[in-house]
Every structure is written in structure tokens, then in C-alpha cells.
Image (spheres, rainbow, N blue to C red):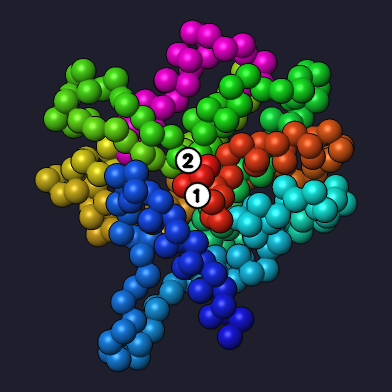
Amino acid sequence: MTKKRSLDYIQERRTIMFDYLASNGIVLDGLKAPNMKEIENRLEGYRFNAFQFWEINNVHDMRLVKGIVERRILAKNFTNNNFRDYSNQYDSVCNQFRNKYYDNIDNTVFSFLALFTLAWKCSFDFFYEIAEVMENSKVSEIPDMQRRLEAFCGTPQIDSLLVQISPNLVNERISIDSRMLIQRRKNIKDIVTEPKGDIFEAEMRRFAEGLVIVAKMLTNMTYRKIPIREWFIQNTIMEDWTTVFLEYNVFQVFISEKKWTNKKIRFVRNMYEKISFDYKNPYFRS
């Protein structure tokens, strides 16, 4: 029953996100609940793989996830000690995955995907690094903060310049999750210190076009006349993935020993205030 409640909790928010995106012309059918009305579907079950099952349990077990999703960490009665407790649990879980990272192929793949998912969806370590630069640079407010954070860790809507070169490939506004976790860290100091103007606008444009190229490769690229995703499924094994994962090393984005000052906590909470999705009032915030 605990797992069923977690699943219902997740699906309720996926449905809210689906309706919100659809109202903005973005239809992601993957967010919709599977059809379980027919008895055959019920008997077959949801068929979660091990990683999906971990995600469902993690939403229940990791307090930081719900704290961000429900915007609980922004509440006035959410103390700095509460924040530190949530952070410590998050770090403990991520450290467990990091310690298993080199054990064997299964643990490498699973640990990579777990940390990548947490870092992409929560951006907790990324925000910590930004807050640290803010404190060290004596910066109390990031210029154009919401727009900058959305560009590097949100879901920006991009009108690509590539339309001028290849209008058949890029002929519409693209909405894509910003998942270049390693690359975005190179921009942290500029996010904090660079004033509004053409210099940083050009940097954000370069990053956005990189997102577009990745997205279009995934959806349009073929290899030997086979869509790249299909070719990947048919022709790669976990050993191949492990080689890439170890080279990429997503754990370099994880800050295992965070030193939270009250100021850093305030900075990070302000960032979530600007960029976190409000499931209770999605249309109001839009």
C-alpha cells in the first residue's frame, strides 16, 4: 500500500505536468498513466524495471525530493536545521551509489543513472556550487536569475538559430530538459558574476544550441538507415554503457561534503523559489 500511494502521488503530478505542458502546445504522452481499465492490463501489472522501482521508492524515502516537489523547503516554518537534515540524507544516499560505482557493471550502470536522475531533476549540487560562488564573491543576487537558471537546469523553450541553416530540421520552438550536467558547471561563475548584456547572452545561446543539437540527434539521426535510438537498443550492451559512464563520470557533479552556512541555504531556497514547478498553481506561475 505504501508503494501504491507513492505511485499515485507520482502519477498525480505527472498528470498535472502533462495538462500544463499540453496547454502550452507541448504534448508528452509518456507522462500519462497507463491504461489499467482492462483486466488483461491489471493482471500483467505495471512491469517496472529495477531502476523505475527505485525511483518510485526514492520519492517516498528521500525527503529532499518531496521537499522540492511540494516546495516544502520554501515554507517559513522549514528551518535551516531541517534543510541540513534533508541535505545530509541526500548526500548519504549519493555517497552509497558512489561507493558502488566501480564494483561491477550492474552497479556502475545503476549508480550512474541514479545520480544522473537526481542531479538532473533536483539540481541540488549545482545550486550548492552556485551558492558557494555567490558567498565567496559577496554577491547577494544573481542578475536575471530565473532566466539563467532555466537555461542551465530547467526546461527552456528555444527558438534555434539553426532554423536559418536547416529549416526542415529545426522548424519550430523546441522545449527540452537541460541535462548537460558536466558542461553547465563551467558556467557557474559567469551565472553569478556576469552582468546582463550581450556577453552572457551569447554564452547562454551557445549552451541552448548545444541542447538543440543533442535533441535533434536523438530524434532525427540515423545510422545505417536505422533511427539512432533503435540502433542503440539493438546493437549495444551494458558493457558498452559502462565504458561511456565511466568516461563521463557523473559523480564529479556531486559535492559529497557540503558546508552549509545560513547564507548558502537562503541562496539555494531563493533559487528553488524561482525555478521549481508549483504543482498547486502551475497556471498561476506560468
User: Which residue is the site of mark 2?
Assistant: 286
Q: In screen coordinates, is 214 left or right of 242?
A: left
Going by the numbered disc 2, the residue's amino acid type is Ser
Q: Count every numbered label the image shows and give the total.
A: 2
Reading the image, the residue beneath label 1 is: 282
Q: Residue at x 50, y 49 (%)?
A: 282
Taking 15 as reference, is 206 above or below it?
Answer: above
Residues shaded magenta? 191-215
Residue 19 sits in quarter: bottom left
Relative to residue 47, is residue 258 drawn left or right?
A: right
Percent across and percent down for residue 119 are 59, 47
Picture residue at 21% right of the left edge, 18% below the top: 164
Q: Judge whether 184 appears above or below 198 on screen.
A: below
Locate residue 161, reporting x and y percent. Answer: 29, 20
Can residue 79 be seen by looking at this rendering?
Answer: yes
Q: Does 4 appear above or below 74?
A: below
Q: SS at mark 2?
A: loop
Residues 257 and 85: in front is 85
Q: Secondary structure at mark 1?
A: helix
Residue ID at (61%, 37%): 274
